[in-house]
Image (cartoon, rainbow, N blue to C red):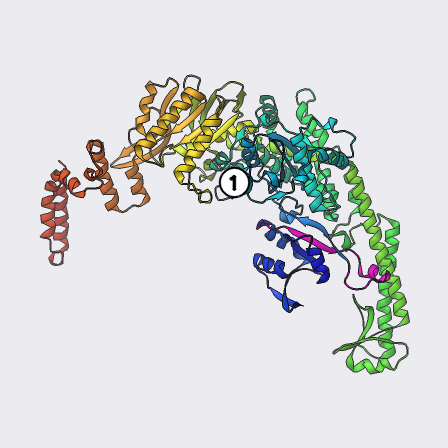
Amino acid sequence: MAQYLNVKQEYKDILLFYRMGDFYEMFLHDAEIAAEALGIALTHRGQIDGERVAMCGVPVHAADSYLAKLIKQGHKVAICEQSETPEAFKRRGGKGPLPRNVVRVVTPGTIQEDGLLDAYQNNFLAAVGRVADALAVAWADMSTGSFHVQSCRTAELESVLARLGPAEFIYPDDLHEKVSVLSLAEQSSRQPAALFDHNRARSLLLDYYGLATLDGLGRFSPQMLSAAGGLLRYLQKTQLEQMPYLTLLCAVMPQDFMVIDTATRKSLELTQTLSGERKGSLLYAIDETATAGGARLLHRRLSAPLTDKDQIEERLELANWFVRHSVLMDDISSLLREIPDIERALARLAAARGGPRDLASLSQGLAAARRLSLRLGTNLNNTADQQITQLCATAQNAAFLAEKITPALADELPASVKDGHFIARGYDSQLDDLRQMRDESRRLIAGLQARYCDDTQIASLKIKHNNVLGYHIDVRSLHGDKLMQNPLFIHRQTTAQSVRFTTTELSDMERQLSSAAERALALEIDLFSRLVDDVLAQKQLISQTAEAVADIDVALSTACLCVCRNYCCPQLGNDRQFAITAGRHPVVEKALAAGQPFIANDCHLTDGANLWLLTGPNMAGKSTYLRQNAQMAILAQAGVFVPASAAKIGIVDKIFSRVGASDDLARGQSTFMVEMVETAAILNQSTDRSLVILDEIGRGTATWDGLAIAWACLEYLHDEIGCRALFATHYHELTGLEEQLERLATHAMQVKEWKGDIVFLHQVAKGAVDRSYGVHVARLAGLPVQVTKRAGQLVKQFDNGHLQQAATLSSLPLFDRHLAAEQSTDDSEKNSRLTEMIDALEPDSMTPKQALSFLYDLKGCADEGKK
């Protein structure tokens, strides 16, 4: 406990996994936290100052699953391992517990184990750096090795972090009060400002990469160096002596990507639904990738659409190559599925956390990448297919390593190098000799046991092994005295059930066996290290191979959307057009039952009519229509085909979507306040090259206030910003603005009335509707008949002008039922005969025929009243 408490002093706010044999133990307050978080038993062991010591533990072999639970709940875990073997400790005369040291601190942004990671998403650690008032964000994925940095303004910080979706991010403690988003984000932590010193960051980067200058990497501003240096220093703190492999730091320009703020990402459900699930998101709907690396690349592209037309068209052209060679698609897809996660296997090996299985995955992946390249190569034209030709060459550049690794590995591989038996027989003659010596010693011990059984006439005599005694002779207690009297046998231990002995011969054999086994394992580990060194010497080539495979995978996935799901290749321009022909919502379309068509709609925002006012009832499809057009702009600039028969899109610099809102209780904001905050952000940040999607602005407040706000927003979009916009509303009064705003065009969701009910046609047409059909929708939702009937009466009264004529609230039909009754006198007279008939009714005395006749009389009376 003294040793544990000494280690714990350095990691006060972090759970400590303290290695004891085959378990990681936790004590005191750590044990109480972990037991509750993991749902495991809390026990006690000994006392400190008269207080019982709380204790819990998890098996080492199952630690990953427990770590995953703790990390997901926001905990950090320090792994404390035995730093010396018992044998070495004894040889140097050590006393007390084995030495232990923390070898690693596991945090949400620094995990590398497959069991803790999402294979389809990057696991970014982000750092915010600052110099004066200038900010920058650096981000790295330890599991793949990527490392980037970009400058940003304070107002842009939230959207940058939303784009990255980091698993964890850190920031200097002197920034906490100045940037409120940091204190509200999950898995964030303040670090000492000294960690982000940009002057020390340059030398830190030079040391890490072994460079004399950073000029070859690009130009980095002081705030960029602050962010990147802070991230590296944090990795040093958590990874201690074993730093991960990161690719050369790459500077990213903010203008390279379409701006998508947090509210818009949430509204459009780009990579996850409102409930946080991948299924049901836009990414899930379009993802046809076959590899983990391809899935992560598609996720990054969808999260950060480009604004450079040439780069987007490169991505689209690569996908078009597969469309033109669609006969290859099945073969290429099958080959891609044979490729394991090369990036993450390489990262684990580089961080000295990899095992034989990672080495095998890498070898298998490189060999499969070469087969993929050769299959594609049979259809290449070196002049016309330059991009795919280059990718094929890159994909097989590191394949020679597979030829070196594959012969070295056995067919069955353990998870850890410490388990041994992973080098194939015949690969190394010295190892084969040591294994033979080890196996021969085991056969000699088996023969020795048989001889001792014969000599002593004790058939149950066994030669066993444990970690305390090593090899020893074990007999039941009743035979103990017999061996005690035999000078050949040396007594070692007596237990309740057995007596244990050794002999000089057995001790000699044990030394030979132990020596051969230890030397064999040491040689295996050495051979493994040499293979890993060969891999790390080519890590840049391997990373390039992984990137090429991912590029091919995403291009093939995009082509599948065209060939199998009728998506089209968008045409990008540097103008402000937005012309979608027969567009569809990708998520809704995928969710529809087989054979059920999606009703496609056009959206043509032209220079003469780039602001559309969309009216129509709830449930008619307005929100679906709004979202599908916003999503198509994002897909197009991500370099992905879109669900339409044709699409021409001028590059969008920023996209804003405000569709629906709810209370933000954490910030103390009502639904209407959230709506106004999001609308303010849109109106303040949009440019004439933006795409704005607004739905039901002003509906969260009083009718006239809401109408006025929506009206003013429309005018501001038209007069001040001039961007492409879709504006959906229930305020039908706004349709009159078409005559005043020259670029405003009214469109409506089409509805068909049939026998008192409505049928949603899900079609958009030019023009406007003057009704919202809210009562009809309420009836479909299952409101009581009395409620919908009364609501229908009130709607008629409002339509007849009673609402406008009312002088005070007390005279409104909504608040005065007697007034409503007086206004419906005619209806009462028509219903009086019906009432008299029902009052005279005696159901118990009627025959079935009389009851049927009475129903006909009631029907006739009702029909008469309608006339």
Q: In the image, 858: left or right of 511? A: left
Q: Residue 30's quadrant in the figure?
A: bottom right
> Where residue 867 appears, x then y in whole percent?
13, 35
Q: Residue 228's quadrant in the figure?
A: top right
Name the secondary structure under disc 1.
loop
Does 637 appear in magenta? Answer: no
Viewer-proximal residue, 664 or 306? Answer: 664
Q: In the image, 857: left or right of 57? A: left
| Disc 1 target residue | 272
> Where residue 425 appears, x then y in whole percent?
82, 51
Q: Residue 542's quadrant in the figure?
A: top right
Residue under the point 52% across and 31% down: 260
Residue 504 in view here:
yes
Does 94 appear in magenta? Answer: yes
> Where residue 347 appears, x then y in whole percent?
71, 42
Q: Local crowd at mark 1 within 10 Å, few (<14), some, or many (≥20)?
A: some
Residue 287 in view here:
no
Viewer-proximal residue, 413 or 510? Answer: 510
Q: Which residues are magenta?
A: 73-98
Residue under the point 34% across and 20% down: 738
The answer to whether 51 is drawn above or below residue 802 in the figure is below
Residue under the point 86% across and 48% down: 428
Amino acid identity at mark 1? Gln
Viewer-proximal residue, 781 or 69? Answer: 69
Q: Work out which quarter of the rendered image holds the N terminus and state it.
A: bottom right
